[in-house]
Image (cartoon, rainbow, N blue to C red):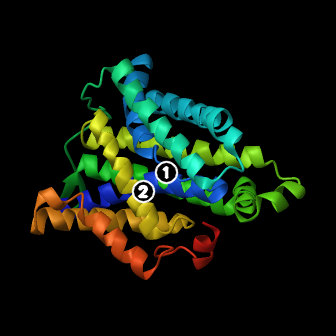
Amino acid sequence: MDELSLVLALGSLYALLAVGIVVVYRTSRVLNFAQGELAIVGGYGVTTAIGVAGGSVILGLGLMVTVAAVLGVVIYFVLMRPILGEAPYVGVLVTIGLAIFLRAAMVFIWEGQIEFVDLGETGDWAIASGLEVPSTNARTFIGCTATFIVIYLIYQRSRLGVRMRAVAENVTLAAQRGINVDVAIATAWVVALVAAGVAGALYGAQALLSVPAAVVGVKAITAALIGGLDSVKGAYVGGLVVATVEYFTTTQISARYADIAPILLLLIVLTVRPWGMFGTAEEVERV
């Protein structure tokens, strides 16, 4: 049971990061390579926020989410809006530059120290008679999955989500219909940063925060590509697939290949379905 809970915890964490990548890509056609760095910065930020909130985990998480939302708006208007209409690779380069900046910020602000996010109890949770799972795994799975569901419902059911999807389909037509394109794309970045912040906090409580831990973003991008860059539900499936392959490789083959195996699977999936498991062929034509 511990093994299953670990796979579910990691899979949901990768999925939450991946959905932020998917929403930004669908709305603005920018592949965000800074999601891992944003997550780890969010984790570090939670440790600081909890201290500012006098040790209250709930207030600390709320403060982190608020700051993440504000930073999402700032990143869009300062970095991404000026390059709207440019070739897709320009946006990719900007996010790579953002990732480098965030790594430097981790060293400058938190001195690159290894941190643990204390979210409370670290024992086992009894979920049935004689059945227990590590609380860190259960908390990560519940927290990431709940946040993912909220994002999914907002994107699929809310009026704002409809506007975001309209911009994703045809930005010119959406603008002509009176949709505020800036609000739609800025909201996508807010979603990405809030998802990254929550994932980073739960990752820090599951493992340890460090500058190299930002490699979790590679797992998220892999999950997004496997699931399909235009598919929100594909992000969750992709996250579970990456976590399963990673665990199987670690336990059955060798831990040294754990990071390589999901990439090899990605190459296989893209060879058969270049648009991912739940993506659409039309997306490839656009790219």
For image coordinates 10% across by 62% down, the residue present is 254
On residue 147, the disc is 1
Q: Quadrant of residue 94?
A: top right
Expressed as whole percent of the image width and height from the top left, the position of residue 19 reads 50, 56
The alpha-carbon separation of the residues under discs 2 and 1 comes to 18 Å
19 relative to 119, above or below? below
Q: Secondary structure at mark 2?
A: helix
Expressed as whole percent of the image width and height from the top left, the position of residue 246 reads 23, 62
* Residue nearer the viewer, 121 or 169: 169
Q: Which quarter of the figure is the N terminus placed in?
A: bottom left
> Of label 2 and label 1, which has the lower sequence position?
1
156 sits left or right of 276 in the view: right
On residue 221, the disc is 2
76 sits left or right of 242 in the view: right
Q: Secondary structure at mark 1?
A: helix
For image coordinates 56% across by 54% down, the residue present is 150
Expressed as whole percent of the image width and height from the top left, the position of residue 44 reads 37, 29
**Disc 1 marks which amino acid?**
Thr
